[in-house]
Image (cartoon, rainbow, N blue to C red):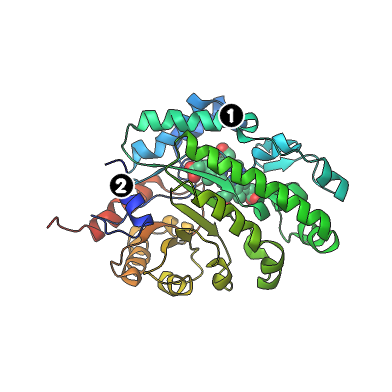
Amino acid sequence: MSDDYRFLKAARRESVDATPIWLMRQAGRYMAEYRALREKHSMLEVINTPELATEVTLQPINAFDLDAAIIFADILPILIGMGLDLEFVPGKGPQLNNPIRSAEDVTALATPSAQDNVPGTLAAISMVREELNGRVPLIGFSGAPFTLASYAIEGGGSKNYVDVKSFMWSEPRAWQLLMEKLTHVVTDYLIRQIEAGAQAVQIFDSWAGILSPGDYQRNVLHFNVRVAKAVARMGVPVIYFGTNMNGMLDLVSTIPVDVYGVDSGVPIDVAWNQLGGPDKVAVQGNIDPIVLHAPWNVVQQHVDDVLRRVGGRPGHIFNLGHGIHKETPVDNVKRLCEYVHEQTEVEPA
Ligand code: 1CP
């Protein structure tokens, strides 16, 4: 049966033969295969060329015992078609050369469909599905409206998010319009990815935790609810992931998704209860990515702690609490995948 994958079953809180594992940013610089390909091709070239995106997506699947693939793309390229000039600057990271500075800038933003905006990623999804030939399911993803707004306004990564917070507070109407436009583009992008073959989707709200719970509730939460509701109609599991949001999991729990990604700042069972409990929702997480730099016995301790807290209850997808670090020792990644499976394997009845 096409839905009979550990990862999809766990997302639906069905029992599994072993706990599924995948790692956020599992394709990337810690892998020699990835670094070799990136020497020849720029970031946007890899993302926009289906053959290259497919190759990179499959690298970790071929190297490790992972239970899901995630399409190789980035959260930022959808901003290009909206009118923002995105560049991945080697050694520095993403940079938007014309960040939003005024209400007029927001009015000028376009809201193209994903087919026109990021056709390469949609084509790559179909190609990866063919190449995977049923080996593991494929996850699609998008940034959440707030996290995308933070890049659009800050012009890149940020330390204290002065510009995005100031804009949100001082330009409430333009903020509303910006979030409306992003909500529209993100929703369409996720739906098109599912139509192209994504069997689950994750909404990355990586930086929403920089807001106070009150600001998150007033200015951000309802847009996430709208995205989640619209995408849920497609009938595939939806995952919402944020970091530093452990003081507002009650708010997060009102976003109607199947799975909540939890960072390493909270014991997973504590978060699970705050999100509605094992009878209502699934959880994904949550060891600190930097733990993979530690000696193996320390990695084991962290994994054991998560598995003990989950206690074999259905609805757990093992992952890191945030994206894998670029200098992670590959051997620990390999052992992690095998260890999670070994420790959770259920003998067939
Ligand atoms: O998981 C996978 O294998 C798919 C690859 C993937 C994903 C899911 C990439 C490739 N980017 C993303 C999502 C993404 N991009 C997020 C959300 C996930 C997270 O919080 O970790 C964010 C915030 C970005 C933005 C971004 N793109 C950054 C962070 C900048 C900052 O604010 O500090 C960076 C460094 C990038 C570039 C990028 N995207 C992906 C990779 C492998 C890289 C590094 C490029 C390279 O050096 O090769």
Q: Tag 2: residue type?
A: Tyr
Residue behind mark 1? 119
Percent position of residue 297, x then y: 32, 62
Is the residue indicated by label 2 positioned so its CB lies within 8 Å of ligand 1?
Answer: no
Q: Nearer the viewer, residue 23 or 203?
A: 203
Tell me what residue is drawn at x 82 percent, y 54 percent.
Answer: 174
Q: Are marks 1 and 2 in contact (CB under 8 Å)?
A: no
Count the marks. 2
Percent position of residue 75, x then y: 60, 44
Residue reaching furthest to the left: 349
Q: What whole-number distance in Å separates the C-alpha atoms at marks 1 and 2? A: 28 Å
Is the residue indicated by label 1 positioned so its CB lies within 8 Å of ligand 1?
Answer: no
Relative vertical location of residue 217 with respect to residue 12 in this rendering, above or below: below
The residue tagged with tag 1: helix, strand or loop? helix
Label 1 neighbour load within 10 Å: few <14, some 14-19, many 20+: some
- Of the numbered discs in the image, which one, if any, rests on residue 209? none
- The picture quadrant for ligand 1 comes to top right
Percent position of residue 213, x then y: 65, 71
Report which quarter residue 292 is drawn in: bottom left
The residue tagged with tag 2: helix, strand or loop? loop
Label 2 neighbour load within 10 Å: few <14, some 14-19, many 20+: some
Residue behind mark 2? 5
The C terminus, quarter of image: bottom left
The answer to whether one can see residue 217 in this image is yes
Percent position of residue 337, x then y: 32, 51
Tell me what residue is drawn at x 30 percent, y 50 percent.
Answer: 6
Tell me what residue is drawn at x 47 percent, y 40 percent.
Answer: 27
Q: Nearer the viewer, residue 191 or 101?
A: 191
Direction from residue 156 to residue 225 in the image, left or right? left
Direction from residue 220 to residue 233 in the image, left or right? left
The answer to whether one can see residue 102 in this image is no
Q: Tag 1: residue type?
A: Pro
